[in-house]
Amino acid sequence: MNKQTAQKQNWSLTHPVTQRVAVIGMGPVGLTLATHFKEAGCEVAICELDRLKVNKIRREGIRLVNVIKKTVHFEHIYTAIPDLIDFKPSLLIFSLKTHQMPAALKQAACLISDYTYVLCAQNGIDVEFMPAAVFGEAKTLRMVLNFAGNLNAPNEVKITFFNPPNYIASIDDSCPDAANEISRILNSVDLTTKSIDSFEIIKRAWEKTILNASLSALCGIGKLTIREAMEMPDTMQIVEQLIEEAVEVAGAEKIFFEDDFIRKCIRYLKKAGAHFPSLAVDLINNRPTEIDFLNGKIVAYGRKHYIRTSLNLVFTNMVKAMTNKKMMAQMPDIIAGREGNSKIAIGLQGELIKQADEICFLGVDLGSAYTKFNVIDREANSLYSTAIKTLDRDKLSVNHVMDVIRSEFNIAYCCATGYGRKHLHQADMVKTEINCAALGVSMFEHGSKNIIDIGGEDIKVVHCNAYDKVENFYLNDKCAAGTGSFLTEIADRAEIPITEMSELAGKSHNDAELNSFCTVFAKTEIMTWLFDGKSIDDIARGIYLSIANRIFKLRIDPQLPIFMIGGVIDHHPFLAKILEPRYGQKVNVIANPQFVVSLGAALYARNVFNKLKQNNAAGKSAEKV
């Protein structure tokens, strides 16, 4: 035994690998692991970039509910990986998505030390090689998890199932003592974990990946829960074929399973709950997925051994195509002037651009369905925008978002608008959504115009004069017909996926419209259509035709250009196309139309602040005179 090895062994006796644990990434896995290490008596630091989530954890701790019930509070909370250098972690746990790892590992390089181990707690094949390339194979451990959960709130995980044990190993058997220690710690708090060798962990990783790959893409594309997918014979057949392909590839890699492995997989999956797999959640929410390390890896290893993996290839490519399409759709299309159904950019939703020293202005649109936030700088550049559900189960969400925004931006003035504007006590001023809509659109299109704003519970038409001022406005009657809530309820009754409704309607040429404006009667009419065998495409178009006629009855000046804003047109672009023949002109949609009113509120905040500043300066000059 050389001197360096002896020193490391002596150090490990007095400084266990779990002495100071840092968990990077507070998704369901990170929240669950951090809670159990903390409960076991370890010194635990958590690192999460999402400041909304961080604020909730600071105030309320982390909660695990359902299958596992625990609540734990934390002292060491960080929002940047390099800041963990002061914590001096002995164990660094990565519970991030695979596509987040390259950037995270680059930042984590400063944490490398002789006595810091790294644990990869992610799904997929070969994921452990990413941290191993930075920290070294001798310091890298891999964990295969057999629990799953979904977020009820940023700091609360609903654990849907736990089929013990989890598995952990040193990826090259250099540090079995570390794996044994982690296993012992987690077992002490009932998160049953078994320490195994490096060859067994590869087999367990393949086993778990085969289970994930058999359902994740299928559930994401079909918007099915695991239970729904396993209850239908047609989808079950697809699942079985996906597993068969993967087992053949694993065999070529000298990874062999028992003869009844496929039957055991099917039995295991049938016991899963009514929840979406992680990849499906990401795909449905337009986020990058881990498909390359699930079905994609099965395809890659299949090619290595000249094995056809047709179904896994199909699902890999479909997920990639859908992800690319959705990600591109989220990018603003910056167009000067109007060109067809023009989309005029107002900033990148959700991208936080920290401007700590620069004066910024905040607009908050408290709508009936969603509350929208928009931060701009002095030049009216949109720096950040986000939306949360209004009055959802977490009534403190608005305050949390306000705290995050104020911590990231130097907010000089805030304007509130929308139905709930008088209830936002942190605002410096309030303004009607009519005026904010006019100012928001006028930032891009000066002069006389019509603005159609379809919200959750009303429809507004605003006429602006040549000076961008509100000349007149009209509202639909008190009935919610034609609004977002009406559309959602009717689509639900027709069992039309709301995210696919525009695409479905575009396939139909049927002119039969929904005649009932009353939600109750409209649902009955929908049922009649379904009994008559009308296609989903025709029903979707019929609903849009009904709403378009409702809008068309409101006063529009046909001589002026038309712009549409609001959450409904954001999610139902087909409405603009169906209105164009009625108005005899192009109907322009502002990019990110859901945030135009909050942008207008932010512009009002900026304008009022500048006037106050000018008045103060003028007053001081008068005093000198």
Image: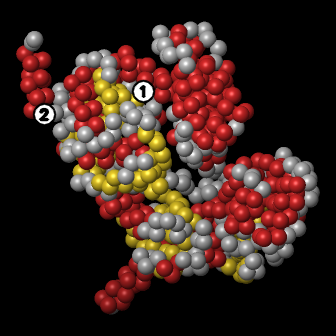
| Callout 1 secondary element | loop
Under mark 2, the amino acid is: His
Q: Which mark is residue 306?
A: none
Which of the two residues, 3 or 33, is positioned nearer the viewer here? 33
Out of 549 and 40, give the one closest to the viewer: 40
Q: Position of residue 466 (x, y in %)?
A: 71, 75
Q: Say which of marks 1 and 2 sits in front.
A: 2
- Residue plotted at (61% across, 75% down): 433
Question: Which image quadrant is residue 171 in?
Answer: top left
Marks counted in the figure total 2
Q: Does any portion of residue 112 appear in the rendered image?
A: no
Q: Amino acid at mark 1?
A: Val
Reading the image, the residue beneath label 2 is 15
| Horizontal relation, residue 164 to residue 576: left or right | left
The answer to whether residue 338 is above or below residue 7 is below
Q: CA distance from mark 1 to mark 2?
A: 28 Å
Q: Quadrant of the N terminus?
A: top left
Where does residue 213 sit, x and y in percent of width and height?
56, 29
Whether residue 117 sits left or right of residue 439 in the image: it is: left
| Residue drawn at point x = 76 percent, y = 80 percent | 477
Q: Position of residue 112 (x, y in %)?
A: 23, 31
Determine which residue is flagged by label 1: 127
Q: Are marks 1 and 2 in contact (CB under 8 Å)?
A: no
First of labels 1, 2 by sequence position: 2
